[in-house]
Amino acid sequence: MDTNQYLEVFIDESTENLQVVNDRLLDLEKNADDLSIVNDIFRAAHTLKGMSATMGFEDLADLTHKLENVLDAIRNEQINVSTSILDVLFDSVEALEDMISDISNGGDGKKDVQAIVGQLKAIESGEAVGENESPKSETATQLSSDISLDEFEQTVLEEALSQGQHVYHISVSLAEDCLLKAARVYMVFEVLEQSGEVIKSIPTVEQLEDEQFDETFDIIVVSEQDDEAIKAKIYKVSEVKDVQIKAFDSSRIRSEEEGTTEEEVSATTEAKPEKESEETDSPKRQKAVSNKTIRVNIERLDTLMNLFEEMIIDRGRLEQISREIEHQDFRETVERMTRISSDLQNVILTMRMVPIEQVFNRFPRMVRNLARDLGKKIDFQIEGAETELDRTVIDEIGDPLVHLIRNAVDHGIETPEKRAASGKSETGRLILKAYHSGNHVFVEIKDDGGGINQDKVLQKALKNDIITNEQASNLNDRQIFELIMASGFSTADQISDISGRGVGLDVVKNTIESLGGTIEIDSEYGEGTTFSIKLPLTLSIISVLLVVLKDETFAVPLSSIIETAVIHKKEIYKARGREVIDFRGNIVPLVHLKEVFAVEQDQDNADDYYSVVIVRKGDQMAGLVVDSFIGQKEIVLKNLGQYLKDVFAISGATILGDGEVALIVDTNALIK
Amino acid sequence: MLETTSNQSKMIVFQLKDEYYGVPVDTVGSIERVQQITRVPNTQSFIKGVINLRGVVTPIIDLRERFQMDAAEFTDQTRIIIVHFDGKDVGLIVDSAKDVVDLPEDSIEPPPEVIGSVEVDYIRGVAKDNNRLLILLNLEKVLSMDEKESLSTVD
């Protein structure tokens, strides 16, 4: 019950709740009249407040509390939703996010939020006059305790009472000879959490856990169940000697209350406390999720994967042995094991997949803020947020997407005036879309903005010496668009006047290529631009073509292969001292992998045919000459370790079925 | 000098030609028999390649070549000592590896000017142990890449 062990859960859940607040605020902006949205926001904010107060993050709880007050006023139609109010609400969400990210980085979540709190207060007091009628029908019996409650706890209790729940003050005494007091306390808490919510304990949870109490401790609990039921449940915990249960005196809470909490009471009559069993209109996914998932450190999954690979290697050996000894039962068992391990592999791989939603979530608000700052109107839509990707890819893809979306908002979509002048609707459309196709995930960012002005791009590229005049006349549309991603194409301060993009797009391109992906641009001047990113489903498993050079095996990533060919020596020409082939009308230079990798040449000329793997990098191609092809294989990508960091034309290694290491060819390094 | 906290250092002793060397036992992950080594092209000649060490691709250095000794065929005695150093895992091919010895801290002396065939650079110190001279390696230098030998890369 040390709060630290809950920190991770707290961070995750707070982030989730903030996301709900965020998403629903965006909805609210579109449907200002829909008060059910406000209810959702309120609930999420409320949960957040509860959690942060429990965890002792006062600033966080405080700000959420103020936020809640405003939301409440909106819900009770004391305040009308306006853009300025929403701006303040968004600012608060941002501040909350900052705090949580501070906490997750090991900070204390403190932040100066006076300004925002002030604004929230102003909004609240502007129209919200506190209603004083507060439902207080709860039985107030004798209270024999000196438990003092802070503002937050009072609020929670008020709320619970107003919803007709019971608040109990429970005194539990443990047997004198109880050895594991902390364990018993834990069990009691667990029982109580099942039937309600523990608001406070005397001594504190920490002290209880450290066994810093005698035999008795006091707890305040909110529950729907009656006292006898709870009492009976607690008695089921061993070594509990005595349980005293009383209804908590609500009048005592009232006496310490302030104006703000009063409003709260009327405010929260509809809201359910967070741990409440779900019913009616709130399908609380939080609870459903926590029942079905556990959080696992990705390193453990990596370890699992490593162990599994070792098993695969041994499986290969077993298969070998079973062929040799020709034993029927043995062979069948090995075959069965082979099937099971294939299934196992799929399970392990899917465990590492997470929805891209995690990355997409932060964009709506970002777009909103950008649009506001730039004075543009944008209708931002997300499709396919449930598309799953390997965790490692998810971690890397966020920044490039931020970049592209910023670009689209900043340079792609025009100002309302300009749009109106060119006959478009004033509101620009920006679509972010993800979908699966084959072994890849596609992410598209599509805007209906100004598009890319090819002439300006060409001029700029010429000016910056990225291309020559001669080249410029031979480029097709797509090649011209790709120029904006060339390094050295533009710098931030110059680009805005080219209807265009280009700010650090080379960085985006590099990141995506380093992930084994590609990025393409499609644009129609005046109509809009689409960036399409193609990403591998996972970084750790890739498809390769295994090739042989003398007695060494190398792997060439399938993603860069166009096709394989067997070419007669007569079809090889010399151009500027280099061997080239005519491949479907393109002149493709040949690269002898044996030379590149310094493999001993055996008797050359033995064969009149070359086995060639045609690979590409962007629009350039090369033919890699190998001795023979083995075939396609899914392999697990491994790096060469810290010691061998930059080996020319080798991007990594993999372990083959027989346990041998094969190197993976970095074809990009071979194409100039 | 080696381990300031204790006055005894445990050393794995291995042999190269007729000389004895020592590496601290806490830097050694395991000692392996020679297995299939995959050559990594375009690296320095003493880097023999990589092996599959229980699922981890591990680079292998031939210490004889590293110290510019004459190459030798692998025998039954040949071992690969896997060392961790500075976040790197590297295997060192040695002629044989058998002993673990306890060296008193004060028996370790700074390296003399010239010793055996190994350049002083790689040596942290020498120690006497049962009538044999033990050369203690400075792993940092042994594993350092920025050597005089230029990297033979393909353009």
Image (spheres, coloured by chain):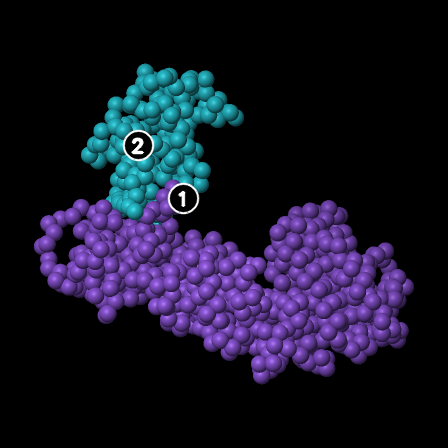
Q: Chain of mark 2?
A: B
Q: Chain A, which colour?
A: purple
Q: Which residue is mark 1?
A: A642
Label at residue A491: none
Chain the render paints cyan: B
Q: Neighbour class for label 2 at 10 Å: few (<14), some, many (≥20)?
A: some
* Nearer to me, A173 or A331: A331
Q: Chain of mark 1?
A: A
Label at residue B66: 2
Side of A588 relative to A288 (left or right): left
Image quarter of residue A54 = bottom right
Residue at 60 percent across and 78 percent down: it is A419
- Looking at the rendered structure, the secondary structure element under dot 1 is loop
Q: Is residue A427 visible?
A: no
- Looking at the rendered structure, the secondary structure element under dot 2 is helix
Q: Are marks 1 and 2 on the same chain?
A: no
Residue at 78 percent across and 60 percent down: it is A115
Q: Position of residue A87 (x, y in %)?
A: 72, 69
Q: Is residue B88 above or below residue A482?
A: above
* Nearer to me, A579 or A171: A579
